[in-house]
C-alpha cells in the first residue's frame, strides 16, 4: 500500500485516510444486500495512531541514505461483521524496539 501511495504522490497516512470507508458508506456483506456503516471512528483511529507513533517525523524512504536506515510505519485495516448490527475498525501499531543491553 505504501508503494501505491508513493506512486500517487501521497504519504502513506494520507493515502489511507483518502481510501478508507467512513460512517454512512455502504458495503456488501454476503447475499443480503448492502449495509450502511455506523459510527466506525475511522478518522479518530488514524489520528490516535499517528499521534502515538510520532507520524510527524515520517520521511519518504527515498530521502534516507546510509547503511543503517530507520523509519516509522503503520498498518490499518477495516473489518466488518455480517451480523448487520455492528462494524469494527482495527488499528495495530508496534512500539519501537528497545534495547535490552545494560538492563538490570
Image (cartoon, rainbow, N blue to C red):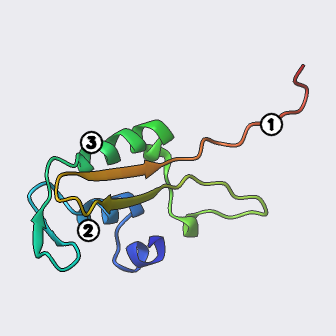
Side of 85 relative to 56 (left or right): left
Side of 43 relative to 64 (left or right): left
Image mark for residue 99: 1
**Quarter assignment of residue 99:** top right
Image mark for residue 19: 2
Name the secondary structure under disc 1: loop
Q: Do the residues labelled 3 and 1 touch (CB within 8 Å)?
A: no
Residue named by callout 3: 44
Closest to the observer: 10 or 102? Answer: 102
Image point 90% across, 19% down: which residue? 104
Give the spatial CA distance, label 3 vs label 2: 15 Å
Percent across and percent down for residue 76 are 41, 58
Tell me the quadrant of the picture where the N terminus can be found. bottom left
Neighbours of disc 1 within 10 Å: few (<14), some (14-19), many (20+): few
**Quarter assignment of residue 26:** bottom left
Percent across and percent down for residue 60 are 50, 63
Closest to the observer: 77 or 70? Answer: 77
Image point 41% across, 43% down: which residue? 49
Check the image and report above or below for 98 versus 3. Answer: above
**Quarter assignment of residue 22:** bottom left
Depth check, mark 3 against mark 1: the one in front is: 3
Amino acid at each position: 500500500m505504501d508503494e501505491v501511495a508513493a506512486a500517487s504522490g501521497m504519504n502513506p497516512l494520507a493515502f489511507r485516510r483518502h481510501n478508507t470507508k467512513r460512517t454512512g458508506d455502504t458495503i456488501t456483506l454476503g447475499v443480503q444486500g448492502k449495509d450502511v456503516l455506523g459510527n466506525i471512528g475511522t478518522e479518530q483511529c488514524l489520528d490516535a495512531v499517528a499521534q502515538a507513533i510520532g507520524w510527524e517525523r515520517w520521511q519518504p524512504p527515498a530521502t534516507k541514505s546510509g547503511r543503517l536506515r530507520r523509519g516509522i510505519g503503520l498498518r490499518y485495516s477495516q473489518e466488518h461483521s455480517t451480523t448487520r448490527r455492528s462494524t469494527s475498525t482495527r488499528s495495530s501499531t508496534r512500539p519501537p524496539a528497545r534495547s535490552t543491553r545494560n538492563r538490570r
